Amino acid sequence: MTFRDCRVPLAALALLTAPLPATAAGAADAAPKVTAAAFRAPTVPGRPGVLYLSIAGGPKPDRLLAVEVKGARAELHETRETAGIMRMAAVKAIAIPAGGKLEMRPGGLHVMLFGLTPPSDGKLPVALVFEKTGRVAATATPMAAAAAGHVH
């Protein structure tokens, strides 16, 4: 057998030993993960609902740019105290630190849900849109109005 006869098998061997590109599963492991998601539907028609999320950061920092909820308009919000008065304001993005954790809770960061019709099965599918990761799907479950501690 000459070298010329070995070219095809060597080329095939090179392909078999080449590093593989990242897989979707590998990319998912690097994505931020939603570890908890709970929503409160509006108690009065025409009023907004609210969504709280817990997000574990991936190995690299990312930013949450938006939350998408079918049939509702979702806005990232924060509550902060200014001169002794609590005020809510929309925010454009929320930083998710590498390996860190973001906790949305009453009186802090949250997602306002405008025009939300409560789902009949109690499960609210949401999509989080991250700057680097893209979309991450999650399902929120209802929380008791008293537990929410956040009135609009």
Image: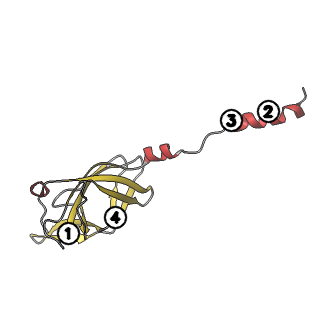
Residue furthest front as drawn: 120
Q: In which quadrant of the rendered image does the N terminus lie?
A: top right
Dot 4, how many residues are within 10 Å of its Cα: few (below 14), some (14-19), or many (20+)? Answer: few
Of the image marks 3 and 4, the number of the one nearer the N terminus: 3
Dot 1, how many residues are within 10 Å of its Cα: few (below 14), some (14-19), or many (20+)? Answer: many
Residue at the disc numbered 3: 16
Label 3: which secondary element: helix
Looking at the picture, which amino acid does disc 2 mark? Answer: Pro
Dot 3, how many residues are within 10 Å of its Cα: few (below 14), some (14-19), or many (20+)? Answer: few
Residue at the disc numbered 4: 70
Of the image marks 3 and 1, the number of the one nearer the N terminus: 3
Residue at the disc numbered 1: 48
Residue at the disc numbered 2: 9
* Residue 23 placement, left or right of 105: right
Which percent across, then down, holds residue 134?
44, 58
Of the image marks 3 and 2, the number of the one nearer the N terminus: 2
Badge 4 vs badge 2, beta-carbon distance below 8 Å: no
Position of 60 relative to 16 (above/below): below
Looking at the picture, which amino acid does disc 1 mark? Answer: Pro
Looking at the picture, which amino acid does disc 3 mark? Answer: Leu
Which percent across, then down, holds residue 54?
27, 51
Of the image marks 4 and 2, the number of the one nearer the N terminus: 2
